[in-house]
Amino acid sequence: MTLSLAAHAQAQPPAEPSPAALVDALNNAFGKHAGKRASHAKGFCATGVFTPAPGAAGFAGSPLFRQSSVAAQVRFSVGGGNPGVSDKSRSVRGLTMRLSGGGEVYDLLLLSEPVFFAATPASFVSFLEARVPDPATRKPDPQKIAVHNAAYPDGTRQPALLAAHAAPQSYATTAYFSNNAFVFGGEGQARQHARIVVEPQAGTHYLSADQEQSLPDQFLQAELRERLGKDGVAYTIYAQLPAAGDSLLDPSQPWQGSAKVALGTLAVQALDDAGACDGVVFMPGNLPASIAMSDDPILRSRAAAYAVSLARRSGGK
């Protein structure tokens, strides 16, 4: 029996949001800010060195992991699209880095929670649409958020984690996570999925209640500069292996896998000049030959959306 046009349309899954729709959702939720990224608009740059761990090339068999050390371009950021957001806000922190060596480039885009706020591009757009401020209250409408959460339960996990603790005391005292899975291949090793976990060598520390009250809204950059002049800032980078049942496609799901492979250490050396990496687009698809993207739909959607964001902050529509 031939379906009517209306029935056929209803039988089709809804179209995935376009790259422009993803950026529109960010702009509508946080406003448009000339020259700024649509997401993680507030941030600053630094320089550093990545030192591969012994045996890292056995897990990720690329020239980059065979170097004694490689240069690192780093950006620290506060989540969201508001460049004036408080450093004390209970939102994610970002650590983005570009490692360059052995003729390869490796971009790592990491957040300070082990889960993302959306499992799919459709959930991503809905999450942000629910948080567009009400013109009267200038705050998101709780009812719209409740409707989103009912339709997309994946949108409840990251906010719950953020609400459970204060903001980090420092960019140097929080762990960072890729959320998305990648596929790694080493020398003679079967290819396997892993997520990236970056652990701070200074330990994990959040603001105390007194610090939340007393610190200014802008303190993270000065704090990191002072820390660099004293004890330094360093992280250990791991590939986290999945446990049985861990989702390889859904970045909103936490992984239970406890096995980790050390990939190396990142030592931050100095803050960079203001705006030094503003024109840099860190892309999750910039990978060494031994690492490939998984089929995670959020991961697959990111490159095209970043290109739209770059065009807009460079003066495009």
Image (cartoon, grey):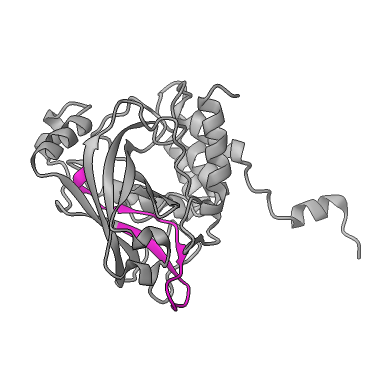
Q: Position of residue 82 (x, y in %)?
A: 39, 28
Q: Is residue 176 left or right of residue 125?
A: left
Can residue 94 be spotted in the picture? no
Q: In which quadrant will I find the N terminus?
A: bottom right
| Residue at the far right in the pictured view | 1
Residue at 14% from the left image edge and 31% from the top image edge: 213
Residue at 14% from the left image edge and 51% from the top image edge: 202
Q: In terms of image quadrants, where is residue 140? A: top left
Q: In which quadrant will I find the C terminus?
A: top right
Residue at 45% from the left image edge and 61% from the top image edge: 181
Q: Is residue 126 left or right of residue 178?
A: right
Q: Position of residue 210 (x, y in %)?
A: 9, 36
Query: Could you say which is closer to the camera, residue 314 or residue 102?
Result: 102
Q: In terms of image quadrants, where is residue 39? A: top left
Q: Position of residue 139 (x, y in %)?
A: 40, 28
Q: Is residue 201 magenta?
A: no
Query: Could you say which is closer to the camera, residue 191 or residue 306?
Result: 191
Query: Could you say which is closer to the camera, residue 150 or residue 273?
Result: 273
Q: Which residues are magenta?
A: 171-197
Q: Is residue 191 magenta?
A: yes
Q: Is residue 193 left or right of residue 301?
A: left
Q: Position of residue 176 (x, y in %)?
A: 30, 52
Can residue 45 be spotted in the picture? yes
Q: How many marks?
A: 0
